[in-house]
Every structure is written in C-alpha cells, then in structure tokens.
Image: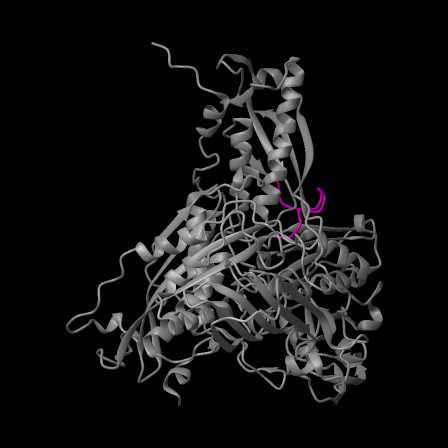
Amino acid sequence: MSAPARSPQEMQDTIAGGIGESPLRPDGTLKVRGEFAYSSDLWHEDMLWGATLRSPHPHARIVRLDVSRALAQPGVHAVLTHEDVPGENVYGLKYQDTPALAADLVRFQGEPVAILAADHPEIARQALKEIVVEYDVLEPITDPERAAHDDTLPKLHPDGNLVRHQRIVKGDPTATADVVVSGVYEIGMQDQAFLGPESGLAVPAEDGGVDLYLATQWLHVDQRQTAKALGLPLEKVRLTLSGVGGAFGGREDLSMQIHSCMLALRTGRPVKMSYNRLESFFGHVHRHPAKMYYEHGATRDGKLVYVRAKMYFDGGAYASKTPVVVGNGTTLSVGPYDVPNAHIEGWGVYTNNPTCGAMRGLGAVQPTYAYESQMDKLAAVLGMDPAELRIRNALSEGSTVVTGQVVDFPAPVAELVQRLRDLPLPPEPAGERDIRELPGGASNTTHGEGVVRGVGYGVTIKNISYAEGLDDYSTARVRLEVLGGEAVAMVHTAAAEVGQGLVTLQQQIARTELGLTRVSVHPADTSVGDAGSSSASRQTYVTGGAVRNACRAVAEGVYARLGLPSEGMSLTGGKVVAADGEVVADLAELLGETAIEETREFHHRKTYPLDPETGQGDAHVQYGFSAHRAVVDVDVDLGLVKVVQLDCAQDVGKAMNPDAVIAQIQGGSAQGLGLAVMEEILVKDGKVRNPSFTDYLIPTILDMPPMRIDVLERPDPHAPYGVRGVGEPPTISATPAIANAIRAATGLELPRVPIRPEHITGV
C-alpha cells in the first residue's frame, strides 16, 4: 500500500537535521574533548611573537618615548610606535577617535603605546621593559555625571566629553499621577569574561598585503579599520575567522588586529599575538556602568501614567558603542510596558575609566535593572502583587512603545509573566537543612539561622539587530554540486561563529531549503560579502535570511535547468519533487559534473533615525521579550546569597534549534546572575583593581541554580521563519529578578548591582 502524497512543505519539515531539530554541532565533540583549535593555537613556521607596551596611567601626556634599547635586545626584530603607523593612526566602530598607538596623550590605563616582535614570547615581554616612556601624569576624569555637565573639566577629545545626548518625549512630559515612586540606581562595570583571550596570526603576503587569522565578531569591519591604519586597499587585507573562545560583545572592537599586521609587514615574517588574562582585561571593552534617576507615576489601581528618567552611561576613554548604548538605553527605558507619557534623557560620556562598548544586552541591561526595581517599589506602595502589576501594564501586539513605534508582531509579555507565576515554587525549607543548600555552601558558615527567602520577578524588552536607520544586512553564497555521486551543498558566509551555534544553524537551513543531508560550511572570511557582526541577537535573523535566500536561488536554478516553474516544486531527499509528490528528477544526475552557485543578501525592513528633539521614530526592527522569576536564600547576618531557583519564560518566535535555544537561555541567565551578585570590574581613580579571574568573580556550576525554561514560539511575520533573537534577553531579565528577590527577602533598598555582602549587612 503506497503512502499518501505529502506536500513539499511537509517533506521539508521532516528533513533530518533541518529546522526545528537539534543536530549535533560540528564543532561540539572537538570542544568537549579539548581538541578544537582556537585562535590562540595558531602556529606558523618562522613565526615571531608580538607584544604590547601599555600605559600604567589613566590620563597622561607622553613627554618622551625611546625604543632604542628595546630594539637592541637580541631576538627583537621590530619595535614600533605611532610614528610607524603606515596609514591613519585612528579607528573606531561609530566614531573614528581611537589611536592605533598613542601619540601624545594616553586616556586610559592600559592604552597601547608601543609594540614589538621577537623570537620568543619571553624575549618579547622582557624587551618591553627596555622601552623608555616619560609621562606627565594628569588628573583623571572619572565621574560620568560631572563629565556630562561640567564645562570646566578638561576636554578629553576635541569636541568635548559628551559622546551622545538623547531625549525621548512621549505624550505629556509633565503628567501627574496619584501614586509616585522614585529611585536612584547604579550598575557596575561588567566584563564579558570570555575564556579565550584576544589572539591572532598575521602573515605577510607576496602582493604586499597581509592575511590575518583571528578571533573576532565582525570580519569586514575589522578589515576596513585595519586596512585604513595600514594604508592598504581592502583587497590586500584578508581576514579569516579562527576558533573563537567566546565573545559576548568584547570582540567587536579591535585589539591586536592592526598591531600584528604592522609587525608582520615590517618584519616580513608571520607574527602571532596572544594576550594573557591580565592584558585581556585592558585589551577589550566592558559593559557601561550607569547611574540612573527614575520616577514612575501610576493610578491607584496600578496603571502606569508616566515615567521620567535621566541616565548617565560611562563610555570611558573612547566612544566604541557608547552612541548605540545611549540609543538603546533611552528607547528601551520604560521596559515592556504600556506607558502613555514619558520624558527620558540619556547621556553617554568620555572619562578616563576603561573604555566601555558592546556586551550582551547592549544598552538594555542598565535601564531594565532600574525600571524593574521601580516596578517592585510601585507594587509595594500599591499593596499589589509584583507579577500582577507587570501583567496589568504589559505591552501587547498593537501597543505603542516610548518612541511611538507600533509593535506589529506578537508581544506576549503578560503571558510570559503569567506562566512564571503559575510555576510551582520550590518547597519552603523545614527542619535541619543540608549546609550545601545554604548561602555559603560547604564553607559551613551557617546552619540556617539568619537565612530568609525571597521571590522576585524581572521582565525585559530588547531590540534585535541594529537600529536607527542602519542598513543592517548579511550575505551568503551557496554552492550545489555532486561529490561522491551525491548532491551536496556548501554554505559560505562571513558570519562569525562565536559559540552560539551559527555553523549548525546554517546547515539546518540549507538542509531544509535544498532537501539534502550533506551540507558543509566554508570557513568564514572576507572573500565573501559582509555578514555584519555576531551581536545584537541578529545572526539567525539576518544571516539565516541570507542563507535562505541563496538556497532558494539555487533551487530556482535547478528548476530552470528542467524548464519547470518553481511553483509547487521542492527539493527533498536529493530529488526534485512536484506538488503531487511525484519525483521529477534525481538531483545528482541532473547536475552531473556541473554546479549551481548563487550569492544573495538579506536586508531586514527599514528602520529610521530618532527625531533629535523628541526621540520619536520607528528605530527598531524587532523586539525580544523574556521574564525571570528568582527564588533566593539570604543570610542577613553575613550578607551571603544563594539563588535557589531561576525560572525563565521567553518568546523565541521559532525555535530553529531547540537545544541551542535552551543553552542560550541558560548561558544568558548565568551572566545575569553574575551581574546581580558578584561580577564587577572595580575601578578607582581610573585604575582597575581586580584584572584577574582570581579577583573578578564569575558564576561557576555551583552558583547556577536549577532552571525551568518555558519557550514560547510566537512567529514574527516580518522575520525569516518567524525567528526572534534569543541570546540577549535572558541576560537582561535575570539580574533584576535576583535583585528583587533579595530585596523581598531583606526589605532593603539595595539600589546597586552587583549586590555585595556589605550592602546587605551594612558593614
């Protein structure tokens, strides 16, 4: 008995390892075994080692710089300063304000002053000590709020100390309300804490150019900035992605790219640069610390009437992504709530603190902590359940956000909170407890005395992809050919696999669209068109869309060879199949020794700049939503906190790879937990006090609690396959959920994260 005919869509949906399944990651086994090659493992015959001399001062003039003694050391082949930069000694993601090597002024501790190449890394390190630098030390500017308004301060850059000021005005900015709560909130400087430090290998080429193999998040923007500094055309600066040991935004800015290429071109030999952990803390940007003044007004039955806020973001020495952080911070400032009236202002400023830039949740982490703290404060004044207050004010499809943009896709904010509220809480402790389950763990700090429990919620809205009028796109090339008698596909993009599973996803899309099992992914490099950055939760959306478009163009080429219209046709199981399920042709036989190759771009729908006066405009492509409920135990005598449970509900649009979705939510939640209770780069007078993983603490497996994760799939009709970015929202909503739970347990204000023991004990 023959099986009933299936539609092409039904056949596509059942492709092994296709969309909606969780195939094995091609890099997974090697990583688990410790056999995966990261950029720090790169090696080349006749290779030299590069090293960087960095300023010990956060603010100083360079009075004298003498490299002659270093250059005279045995085994040293080149020592370079700003005078040796062959092109323009400036780069930057948004503003061109960062010198490749400091010329006359250093603006932060750790700024690169000179570079050298030597036969051995130890020779290089010792030679750095022979470089003579005399500084005229200046008073550092470290207060971002003062830097935003005090014109008497020295100008750190020619145009002053203000990077961006953004105002958002919606409705009546002077509206009044029955119930008003206010607060001042601060968030510390968080590090991306990726495990693979900055590294790369530059190889000089016969054409006078250079080939650079490195770990990065955006190959083409690195290429453009590096070529400009080297004074070379783009085609002579070729970049190939090597194994990336985590990123989270910290690899968007340049680190060793220009330096390694300069040394390779000067010496005529391959040069490897690989930072140690100490140098890594100074070699990449961090999350912006912020100070935020908030006021919420509501009716007596809990409906929000207005939000007013002022936010100060410390950008540090150079602009990096500060303009974007201010844009995101202000446009997302009232959260996933329906607020009819708002007056918001945000400032991003230069200081002599470490440069801050992209980190997971860019610009949304700071206001979310503030407005979710406010929501709990408002609920307490109203005598209302915090979850109910959030549900009552939740955005939904058709709502208007603070910029006037209409949410024209599913926005199940209320449902996310309801689902969390309906989950059972962990049982209340009774009797003598296992000390391993208490704050302080196995350190035997308590047997339960002084330990109280609290429950808290955190909800967020995060923009997906780039915004404010930027034409954000990706490019993909797909080749269909016969190998070993079987039709196979090759996908080639410049999109950076930074651990999020993008290589797997590209295979899944190609399998689904072309009906093949065998799909390989070409190493990412700059020989194919730009794919943009692996950030802003955008790659599944944008590069996924580009791979889909290229695959469909290849399929059109197949149908054209048969002289058939594409309508109702599909590729499945290596066959060309008609709408009624009839096999029209064998793909391998049709192709023979030929191939079909197509390159396509995907551009998401347009966004628009904000009005400079009111901040109104359709600035964002899409929003992601997530919610957490945290349960904590707090030892109020010692100030120790244990997160007992951390549940999450998130709308992902379409779970392209369900296992990867869960992993992204778990990983993001861990970073949010870190910010809530332990992670902070401590900076005093512009100097970093804890640049090591001994003193900068990150959560371990012992700190992560059990998680119940509820994944919703409410497809966005404007997105490829209905997808919605996954990676960033859980990082954002986890932090305020934990902070609110600690407040609920202790009754304390706790206006700053991370929450330290002394904040709880008062000593």
Q: Is residue 649 visible?
A: no
In front here: 659 or 205?
659
| Image position, residue 196 (x, y; %) | 54, 62
Q: Is residue 346 left or right of residue 502?
A: right
Q: Is residue 138 left or right of residue 13?
A: right
**Number of callouts in the render?**
0
Quarter of the image that includes the C terminus: bottom left
| Image position, residue 51 (x, y; %) | 68, 70
Highlighted range, magenta: 522-533
- Identify the residue shown where x is 57% and y is 39%: 720
Q: Can residue 405 be seen in this view?
A: yes
In front here: 407 or 346?
407
- Identify the residue shown where x is 50% and y is 12%: 582
Residue most toward the top? 1
| Image position, residue 268 (x, y; %) | 78, 59
Snapshot quadrant of residue 93: bottom right
The secondary structure making up most of the magenta span is loop
Q: Check residue 56 for magenta coloring.
A: no
In front here: 576 or 256?
576
